[in-house]
Amino acid sequence: MAIAVAFVWAPALPALYAQTTSVEIDTIRTSIRPQLELRVPSGEVRQDTTIPVGESRFNVNSVFDLYTGSISGEIRGFRSIGDVTPYLAVGLQLDAEPPLTADVTDGVAGLAADETIERDRFAGTGLRWELVPGAVVLSTEVREKLFLSGETERNTVDLTPEVAWEIEDIRPILPQRTPETVGGLLQVAFTQRTSLDAGSAVDLRWRVSAVLNHRPADMWRWEHRLTATTPLVVWDRERSQPLGLGGFDSVRGVDAGSVPGRRAIVLGNTLSRALGPGAPADGNGVQRVRFHSLRAIAVGDVAMLQNDWSLVDVPRVIAGAGLGLASTVSAPGSIHLDVRAYAALPAERSPMPILYLRTSLFALSEGG
């Protein structure tokens, strides 16, 4: 079995980039998975590790925010049984803002009036059933949130089942040694949220996500992203949570999560052109560190959103665009480092641009 390891240092890395891509072409199997991320300016440090144990595998990931001091962790266990892959998951998140200090009164440690703590823990289960075409993913999650602020305490428990259908055909670009892929991914999901502490349903949401990577010419690569989400039914408007648009996973050039919306459609484009030849795929033949596959990048994203419950609300449009460069560094032992850096500005105004940097360490290994 092929084993491939990846390392990512990425400010504002999008979720679609962060996903695992594992495909097989002839005797080459590639797996690109971020193992460590640093997101600037959000200050998040992310770790992601997959551990195979016999016929099972465990995914362990954690996130630490350098600015707020929040920390979270999650463990998922998978085991494939024919075309069905069930899983179990547990996780915990702890937020403390501003940093905690002991306020001792009558020998009891408490919180100052302007301090808050939020604890978020969950357990979930689900399965992925491979079909032709695509796959059906069923999941259920129970999430408990505890919020403390001064003398105020609030506890909520939510149950969130989801059913999704997805189809994937993503292939690595060979013979170049870059983490570039061609093909597409489409997922349609329905998510229903119920508040167990209130004893009532909150909302039912629909979401579609799509990615298409293709090469319109030999030296060019174009990636399209489409994300659309809307509430189909809302039973409890007070508990129904809005979206937060902006950032690397929606509109680049706009501050992450700064634009609220109840429903939204986001279209993203990344166009790159090679400025020089690539490199052969046999990394074991590399005798020294070398730079190759220099590429120019242009990005452009646009989103149309509504933040009102009424469908007749006039949609708001936000957009952003930017330019940058990318290159790959290869070293002996079939180890390759891809680096992307660019700056993006919003269309509505022109403050200082937001700088994005993503580096990923990956390997292509032979397998069957």
Image: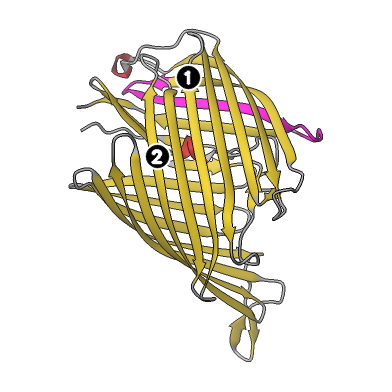
User: Extreme bottom residue here?
Assistant: 106
Three-letter amino acid code of the residue under disc 2: Glu
**Drawn side of residue 1 relative to residue 123, left or right:** left
- Alpha-carbon neighbours of circle 1 within 10 Å: few (<14), some, or many (≥20)? some
Q: Which residues are magenta?
A: 330-352
The figure's colour scheme reads: secondary structure
**Where 345 sits versus 188, above or below?**
above
Three-letter amino acid code of the residue under disc 1: His
Q: Which mark is residue 214?
A: 1
Identify the image quadrant of residue 347: top right
Identify the image quadrant of residue 250: top right
Is residue 60 something one can see in this rendering? Answer: yes
Tell me the quadrant of the picture where the N terminus can be found: top left
Identify the image quadrant of residue 39: top right
Per the image, label 1 sits on a secondary structure element best described as strand
Q: Are marks 1 and 2 in contact (CB under 8 Å)?
A: no
Residue linked to disc 2: 166
**Where 237 sits versus 30, above or below?**
below
Residue 366 position in % (x across, y down): 24, 24
